[in-house]
Image (tube, rainbow, N blue to C red):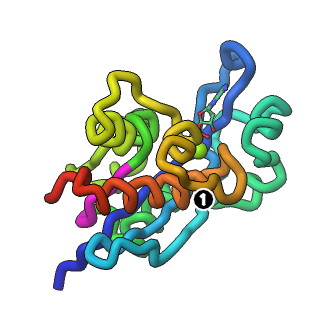
Amino acid sequence: MSDNYLNVVDVEATCWEGTPPSGQVNEIIEVGVCVLDLDAGQRVARRRIMVRPGCSRVSDFCTRLTGITQDEVDAGVDFGTACAILRDELSSRSRPWASWGDYDRKQFQRQCSPGGAPYPFGGRHTNAKAIFAQSHGMRKRLGMSQALEHAGLALEGRHHRGADDAWNIAALVIHLLRRGGWPSR
Ligand code: AMP
Ligand code: MG
């Protein structure tokens, strides 16, 4: 039986103030997921998968931005395992998914490109940032925190933590669902 759930996904990645140090690239270190029941318009689950990067390290800059430390990601799973968890425990191949902007989707595509882990998602991705702008008749696409403010919603938890961002983005999707602005599948 197919459910009517949406996986709202937000990733954090290794980052630096400027360009990456030689030999390092941006890699996913946290996958936050909030599962939304589209029929009930309710958040029904929340997951955080910490991911050990293969060829980069968590800089002090990245820790200040996200709160994530190298110790925390050392205790995480590798990227391939994170993809398998998404597929096996969060039905990511069959469920539609959404994120704020296209960064998250593109980062998965980069890390899953030939030779990498199999891409864990199906084809139904919605850019909630674009839909929010469209539904509010805005030319400018707002960042997540500005969008929450615009919608009169509180930012819960810590911005730039994947699981909290996914939770808050899911609140924005519910806001869009209620005003009839979320595209039906
Ligand atoms: P976010 O979902 O907004 O927390 O951002 C996802 C990822 O984008 C972060 O984990 C960083 O890798 C990168 N990022 C976001 N904001 C910045 C920034 N101001 N400077 C450098 N990297 C950033
Ligand atoms: Mg985030």
Q: Nearer the viewer, residue 37 or 12?
A: 37
Write the residue at 74% across / 19% down.
17
Which of the image's four quarters has the N terminus?
bottom left
What stretch of residues is rendered in magenta?
A: 94-98
Q: Based on the picture, tell me whether residue 136 belongs to the magenta stretch.
A: no
SS of the residue at dot 1?
Answer: helix
Label the magenta part by its dominant secondary structure: loop
Reply above or below: 19 against 183.
above
Q: Nearer the viewer, residue 101 or 14?
A: 101
Q: Image quadrant of residue 174?
A: bottom left
Coordinates of residue 13 in the picture (x, y in percent): 61, 39
Residue at the extreme bottom of the image, as rendered: 1
Q: Image quadrant of residue 120?
A: bottom left
Q: Nearer the viewer, residue 54 or 72?
A: 72
Reply above or below: 88 against 134.
below
Using residue 185 as the reference point, say whether residue 25 is left or right of it. Answer: right
Q: Image quadrant of residue 185?
A: bottom left
Number of residues whose C-alpha sits closer than 10 Å to that of mark 1, classed few (under 14), some (14–19) or many (20 or more)? many
Residue 37 visible within the image? yes
Q: Mark 1 points at which residue?
A: 163
Ligand 1's quadrant: top right
Q: Nearer the viewer, residue 177 or 70?
A: 177
Residue 78 visible within the image? no
Coordinates of residue 164 in the picture (x, y in percent): 62, 57
Write the residue at 63% across / 47% down.
29
Coordinates of residue 5 in the picture (x, y in percent): 30, 71
Q: What residue type is labelled 1?
A: Ala
Write the residue at 28% across / 41% down.
135
Coordinates of residue 171 in the picture (x, y in percent): 47, 60
Using residue 73 as the reference point, say whether residue 71 is left or right of it. Answer: right
Using residue 80 as the reference point, say whether residue 175 is left or right of it. Answer: left
